[in-house]
Amino acid sequence: MHHALGLALCLSAIALAPRLARAHDWYPAYCCSGQDCYEIGPEDVEFVGQGYFIKATGEYYPRDAVPESPDGKFHRCSVQGKREGRTLCLFAPTPAF
């Protein structure tokens, strides 16, 4: 019984691995070297005027310079993937207005 459960878990992990790997394949190469991009929550970004204010760094990006994310979530690419690092790219959900 334990062997069957272990096998089922391993097979599930193998089946999900390609989907997890592809989850970040959409980041452009100029933004990400494989470790620089990550999802951020809506609480990490504030819509101000006609753009986005990144709370962790105080950076501001005009809305027309921020591409839409394909998964409808915020994503940020920063120098060496550090939260306090300079933003290389910001992706945002489709605006609701």
Image (tube, grey):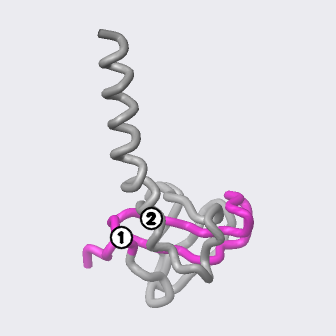
Mark 2–mark 1 distance (CA, rounded to whole Å): 6 Å
The residue carrying mark 2 is: 74
In the figure, 21 relative to 59: above or below? above
The residue carrying mark 1 is: 93
Q: Is residue 71 left or right of residue 35?
A: left
- Label 2 crowding class (10 Å Cα cut-off): few <14, some 14-19, many 20+? many
Which quadrant of the view contains residue 13? top left
- Label 1 crowding class (10 Å Cα cut-off): few <14, some 14-19, many 20+? some
Residue 55, given in percent of the width and then of the height, sits at 60, 62
At x 42%, y 62%, the residue is 22
Q: Is residue 60 visible?
A: no
Q: Is residue 32 left or right of residue 28?
A: right
Name the amino acid type tagged 2: Phe
Q: Which residues are magenta?
A: 69-97
At x 39%, y 43%, the residue is 14
At x 40%, y 55%, the residue is 18
Q: Indicate the quadrant containing the N terminus: top left, top right, bottom left or bottom right.
A: top left
